[in-house]
Amino acid sequence: MSDPIQLLTADGTRVEHPDVAFTPDAALLAQHGDEAGVLKALLRDMSLLRRFDVEATALQRHGELGLWPPSLGQEAAQIGAGRALARQDHVFPTYREHGIAWCRGIDPVGLLGLFRGTDHVGWDPVEKGYEPVTIVIGAHALHAVGYALGVVHDGAVGTGDAARDTAVMACFGDGATSQGDVNEAFVFAASYHVPVVFFVQNNHWAISEPLARQTRIPIAQRADGFGFPSYRVDGNDVLATYAVVRRALEHARSGQGPVLVEAVTYRMGAHTTTDDPTRYRTDDELESWRRRDPIDRLAAHLRAEGIADDAWFTALDAEAEELGADIRARCKALPDPSPLASFDETYVELTPTLAAQRAEVVELMDLDGAEHEEVAR
Amino acid sequence: MTTLTMAKALNAGLRRAMEGDDKVVLLGEDIGRLGGVFRITEGLQKDFGENRVLDTPLAESGIVGTAIGLALRGYRPVVEIQFDGFVYPAYDQIVCQVAKLRTRSGGRHALPIVIRIPYGGGIGAVEHHSESPEAQFAHTPGLKVLTPSNPVDGYWMLQQAIAHDDPVVFLEPKRLYHSMKAELDPALEPGPLFASRVVRQGTDATLIAYGPTVQTCLAAAEQAAEEGRSLEVIDLRTLSPLDLGPAVASVTKTGRAVVVHEAHRSFGVGAEVAAAVTEHCFYALEAPVLRVCGYDTPYPLSRVEHEWLPTVDRVLDAVDRAVAF
């Protein structure tokens, strides 16, 4: 399999690819004026995502979050994929897709609740087209396929109506490709020819296990055996990732069936804040990927081409700092959930058994004193 | 009024549910052209098309996971797991996904999924084809677990489960599929879904059963009556939520209870029933609540399965012990 598709080199030089070109869709162009505007918008997305992610990691270190899975280093893969999505598309994410959530218009603080223990999901999955994160590795790939099957049954694929045709994105990593559920999702997607894009961020590490423990061939090549096309793209190149994912989504929406996109990237941070990657990987490896940083390369390109000047970068830094402070303040202000929420959210129709247990909790809280009465109500 | 087997009643129930709501779709292995290995879906693909009755690839986790996605898109999937012992590859999807997604969505998602599983023994089958996994699902918050004991309940309960907005594991006693017939009047209104029922009145002891063992207990009560002993029989019908109202009322009257199921005894539904009945009927009880169950071994070879399954003799022996206590 050939090298990953690249449109922006690590030093920030735009390069041509025989099959794929960076052409922003009409909505992005309308929003940002011209291609230069889109490039600045993508850099802004990636920079703010990184600032958010760094803030979340810090919040965990300060005891404000129980855990955090950093997206550090994967900004181009996530923003490139996220900005290629159409309004009606639907995403089934893992716990690390903060950048795709950002592109879906989800308030980043909404991503923190799960890790602070205050809320299972801080957004409306239907309105945002972005499901609750799945922590059981790969399980949601099947949900994406089933959802896409429903899209087919609804006649929302291959109609040529750009506002109707719908693609479904299943996000997972290199480790997940070993899961049975992911492989079953490949089989079902191919069998029913559904509009799903399997967006694999190959970040080279499944906690401590290297890519070579999961696969002997490039992940994209797996798709051949299941009978659908795939792309292998430089996941630290936001232009190439956007271009490839956009093409994959259009392939799906137009009724041509599933596609796999392998975005080759690198998890610069720990798996989660409980992990210590110095135990299993070298500084040299980390340094080699630091030189391929997704943000640095687009910034270099914008400077070299005179698209953005110092004042623009200074303003972006200030915006990022403001975001960090806002995230910090609002994270700490997230309200504790009601102890009764889990009773009310288990079933659509509360069972008598659970109603009795709920009543026990209400009674116990009353015994505890007045401070819980508010919550009980 | 028509006379239907359990298999035909379930088939008629599925047909009526599909006629009433075009969001109802069926998924499973061999359920299309073949009509299912037990013929429960016979004729449905022909009449409703391949988009409503889907033959799936051979992967149980894939079937249930796909059903979840369909439910999130607004469909009401009905999954057929071919045999009880084949449900385990789908266990994560059922326990971590189907059962928890409503909670994990902060109460925003509903998952109106029915997972039909033929269960229980007594048909001379090979290994993995005679199991009773109900306790594993009844122990899982977020699921509801139902089991009909007769064709009339099969017909109504399946339709009610499909119309219900929470996920249901629907356990069908497979040995009754073709052996048990009953008269069905489709014009009648069904009773409440999550309710157990007194199926035979009695005064000396209470037999509490569900699914395949209801027939065993009715036969035991019949034999006991010939010997001058009056047994009341409760058909639980719903294992989650467990409705013990009729059982508690009955045991308060009789003072003795025997729980009967095919599943292994330890940590089973019988243990939950015994604990709850004891809690509610402590002063009325004349004897401990006894259990007649499958033994704590993997399901045995078919030549000896009738030594393992609850029989009329074992039920009556337990009643004797309760009376003599």
Image (tube, coloured by chain):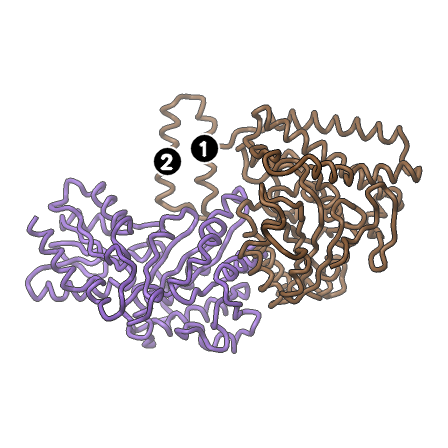
Q: Residue A293 placed where, x, y %? A: 77, 39
Res. B53 visible in picture: no
Q: Residue B126 placed where, x, y %? A: 33, 70
Dividing the picture into quadrants, the one containing residue B302 is bottom left
Q: Which chain is purple?
A: B
Residue B244 position (above or below residue A1): above
Q: How far apart are the two marked residues, 1 and 2, measured between alpha carbons? A: 12 Å
Identify residue type, mark 1: Pro
Q: Residue B76 placed where, x, y %? A: 51, 60
Identify residue type, mark 2: Ala
Circles 1 and 2 in contact, beta carbons < 8 Å: no
Q: Is residue B35 left or right of residue A224?
A: left
Q: Nearer the viewer, residue A23 or A217?
A: A217
Q: Nearer the viewer, residue A1 or B227?
A: A1
Kind of element beneath mark 1 = loop
Kind of element beneath mark 2 = helix
Q: Classify the position of the N terminus of chain B by image quarter.
A: bottom left
Residue placed at 69% from the left, 32% from the top? A52
Res. B112 visible in picture: yes
Q: Chain of mark 1?
A: A
Q: Which chain is brown?
A: A
Q: Which residue is labeled 1 in the image?
A: A339
Residue placed at 37% from the left, 64% from the top? B189
Q: Chain of mark 2?
A: A
Q: Earlier in the sequence, mark 1 or mark 2?
A: 1
